[in-house]
Amino acid sequence: MTVHVNPSTLPELAETLLAWAKTLDDVSAELWRVPSGDSVHLDIIGRLASGVRVRVFGGTDFDDATFPDLPVNQRQEMPVFALRAWIDRGEVAA
């Protein structure tokens, strides 16, 4: 199952994805900078208690300061806890 969420800011997106992550088992997260290079999708992937695989994603504008090492059209795994940094302090992705 795929769920698209559409919060308006990176902290809101991170908060929404973290809320979803708390409801899933075997959770992982990744970033994907789209081919045009102007935005980044953040994804949470996990399983419901029933075993159904779920991908929850949303997009945000690309910014060099926030995503310093994310080339165009590349995916990178990231720790789920990094979402909390964007909620709490607005730190950059590692």
Image (spheres, rainbow, N blue to C red):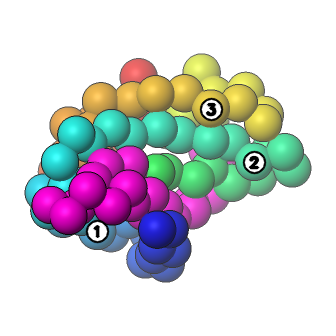
The image quadrant where one finds the C terminus is top left
Q: CA distance from mark 2 to mark 3?
A: 9 Å
Q: Is residue 91 visible?
A: no
Q: Is residue 74 visible?
A: yes
Tell me where residue 87 appears, x and y as whole percent: 23, 55
Q: Does 62 appear in magenta?
A: yes
Which mark is drawn over residue 16? 1
Which mark is drawn over residue 93? none
How many numbered discs, if any?
3
Q: CA distance from mark 3 to mark 1?
A: 20 Å
The kind of secondary structure the magenta stretch mainly shows is: strand
Q: Which residue is mark 2?
A: 34
- Between 15 and 91, the one nearer to me in the picture: 15
Q: CA distance from mark 2 to mark 1?
A: 21 Å
Question: What residue range appears in magenta?
Answer: 44-63
Q: Amino acid at mark 2?
A: Val
| Secondary structure category for the residue under label 2 | loop
